[in-house]
Image (cartoon, coloured by chain):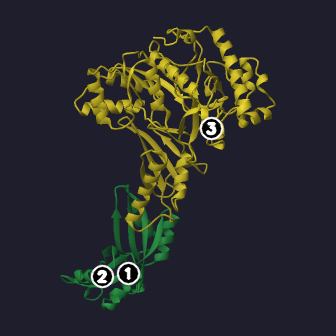
Chain colours: A yellow, B green
Amino acid sequence: MIWNDEFETMPKEALQALQLKRLQKTLQRVYESVPFYRESFKKANITPDSVQSLDDIQKLPFTLKQDMRDNYPYGLFAAPLDQIVRIHASSGTTGKPTVVGYTQRDIDNWSELMARSFAAAGAHSGDIIHNAYGYGLFTGGLGAHYGAEKLGASVIPMSGGNTKKQIMIMKDFGSTVLTCTPSYCLYLAEAAAEEGIDIRDLPLRVGIHGAEPWSEQMRDEIEAKLGIKALDIYGLSEILGPGVAIECIEAQNGLHIWEDHFIPEIINPDTGEVLPHGEQGELVITTITKEGIPMIRYRTRDITRILPEPCVCGRSHARLERMSGRSDDMMIIRGVNVFPSQIEAILMKIEGVEPHYQLVIDREENLDTLEIHVEVDEAIFSDEVKVLQGLSKEIRNQIKEMLGVTCEVRLVEPKTIARSEGKAQRVIDNRDFS
Amino acid sequence: MKVEQISIFIENKSGRLAEVTRILGEAGVNIRALSLADTSDFGILRLIVDQVDLAKDALKADGFTVNKTEVIAVEVPDKPKGLFGILDTLENGNVNVEYMYAFVERCGENAVIIFRFDDTESAIKVLLDNNINVLKGERVCQM
């Protein structure tokens, strides 16, 4: 079903005219109210008036995650705090999160886009939406929640964890739509099987999964094990949260990005050069309706391509191919964004640990696992077992506390971590997303 | 009074222990006593050897992590309750044993036990105050 026919099926030309109008308005807004943008525009020798066509967007400088950190917490807000009704944040590389603010209009737009996304996934009023994304600073839970209400569905605000209860409620309440990370979805199915419950026998019909990379094989597995249609949703807090792009149930092939709110570009991550539609590169997004914290040419670091061909569902908005990786070293572990530098900073802080470490990520029984290998040198070595075990425990606890990720620590002999050209290979990801 | 012990970090995988003994053997080092503490992931091998520095250097040269620690060697009567008497004395003196292991060789009529304490100095004092013989380092290494 199409939630908002007027905008979702708007002819390309009208859509582009709308994009340009909204882009110019956004540029005016950030130029007037955000010193960071005013300065970066000046440095590039441009003003909002320099953008007279959609192609002119290429004149604008990129915005990086680092720019958000440099302007922590509210420096990039384009609305005064008395107009900000919601603040979310995602984990940052240096312990400080990246902060985003929403005006009431932003929340309304977000709800609209999530409602569109639910509808694209085949959900409708009367559905019981079981929302197992985490509620809190993370945008997943509340983003999906507001969209589900806007859709007119009954939303169960489950949040993450407490799997047995999730299964009981799913069964007793008759959930028809499930929103959670793809790995948690499979975990739920297996936990249910252990309780003697086959999710295929329940009314559950659709799963909307995102916040971590997954593959077509994983989709097949989810659809087979739960007896549902599984759809890929894309979002990031810097741009909005969930609901930036989603697959339609008709095609299940590429994620429609809501072009009346976002302008996507694909660039070569090394040169910054804009690539033609169809070529693979890094996704760059400009928000054109946001008031709280508009983003101009934000480099998402996600690798994809734009599929411009019309879709069978009738929506005119372009599709993004399923994300195939990152142009930086960010890892997504059980839906949590983790950079190796964050782990390095924690290891450095724990006295004596020199940063010869390796992160090994795997997927066991459909849940991501993180194992940190730390080389034991003389500074941390002890003849007492309890000292070394205490060190492992300290690293585990600190990482859990700072990053919210559970890990195992393995102490290894010096020089056992493979080094290439003197540089250790920091991350080994054994998960298969292809 | 103190004996130098070397401890070696060993990952819990096959061949590592053999590798340590090979390196020591090729360096001409003789092991006098040993204990291995193991966990599921790693082990700590503690050795009393005849040539401490030579052993340490040889192992380090082959990439092992090696530390030197001070332990003490105590003469223990080789008869029932012999060890109990010593541990009882230590407990009364409020000294905590981190770990201990036995020497193969005897010292006259007595057995020899290596002790690692959290507070070595007070342990020596308690032992000496109770007339328990603590062996000299050089003597232990050459036993």
Q: Residue at x 33, y 32 (%)?
A: A188
The 10 Å Cα crowd at callout 1, few under 14, some 14 to 19, many 20 or more, is many
Question: Circle 1 sits in a helix, a strand or a loop, which is it?
Answer: strand
- Residue sitting at x 64%, y 34%: A80
Q: Compute the Cα span from label 3 to label 2.
A: 60 Å
Residue for badge 2: B90
Which amino acid, by three-letter code, is at mark 2? Answer: Leu
To the question of a shared chain for discs 3 and 2, the answer is: no
Towards the viewer: B34 or B127: B127
For disc 3, the marked residue is A65
Task: Find disc 1 in the rendering and name its residue.
Answer: B72
**Amino acid residing under circle 1:** Ile
Return the x and y of residue A50 as percentages of the image width and height. Answer: 79, 23
Q: Mark 1 vs mark 2: which is more N-terminal?
A: 1
| Residue type, mark 3 in image | Lys
Q: Is residue A206 above or below residue A187?
A: above
